Amino acid sequence: MVKSGLVDRPRVSHYRLALHLSTAFLTFVYTFWVAMDLWYPVKKQIHTSVRNLIRIGFGVLLIQIIWGAFVAGLQAGYIHSFWPFMSEGKLMHPTVYQEVTPVWRNFVEGKSGVQFIHRYLAYVVVGVIVYIWYRTKNLQLTLPQQYGIYALLFMVLVQFVLGVFTLLYQVPLVLGVLHQAVALLLLGTMTFVLHRFTR
């Protein structure tokens, strides 16, 4: 990864950055899961439909993290510093699908397209987690399940607000690093919740 960007320019391949980040995060998830198997050896109150919903949320969050790495690798956070619109009064800036050809490459290699995916996928992540909370609020849950759901709701709201401010202020170092760190905490919280509804 480092070699891909430090030969002729001080920037790494966003694909390799995403792979590197995803591998690190998934290693953390696996290690955390094994640790929780030791902390909670007894199965309790598995709600199959909710578990499947949490699995979907986990998958969407992983995709969002990958596109976050694309944004970082392409330095796409420095453009379109408006919210809630990408530019003044527009949900989609024209460069989202015009930056490179063919059109599909804009969403993995174009700065505008990559930011578009990361920006609006954030709403999906928030929506799924709020729906998880809604689906579980009337269920008989164990304390770890309850605490996990509320922690997940809190973490996703913190991460969303951090993302907005990181964008508005054009990625100051502190906010950028904090946004990435909270992404790891959010993934860890989602892993905890999935484990509590699985085991």
Image (cartoon, rainbow, N blue to C red):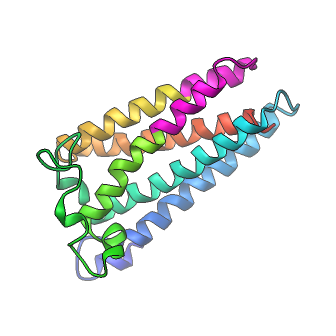
* Image coordinates for residue 163, horizontal then vertical, percent: 32, 41
Specify the segment rendered in magenta. Answer: 126-151
Q: Is residue 25 left or right of residue 16?
A: right
Q: Residue at x 56, y 61 (%)?
A: 23
Q: Quadrant of the C terminus?
A: top right
* Image coordinates for residue 19, horizontal then vertical, percent: 49, 67
* Image coordinates for residue 101, horizontal then vertical, percent: 27, 81
Q: Of 65 and 124, which appears nearest the observer?
A: 124
**Position of 101 relative to 79 (above/below):** below
Q: Of 71 and 47, which appears nearest the observer?
A: 47
Q: Residue at x 38, y 54 (%)?
A: 68
Report the label total: 0
**Position of 91 relative to 193 (above/below):** below
Is residue 136 magenta-colored? yes
Q: Is residue 36 left or right of residue 68?
A: right
Q: Is residue 39 visible?
A: yes
Q: Quadrant of residue 40?
A: top right
The secondary structure that most of the magenta stretch takes on is helix
Q: Is residue 72 visible?
A: no
* Image coordinates for residue 95, horizontal then vertical, percent: 18, 66
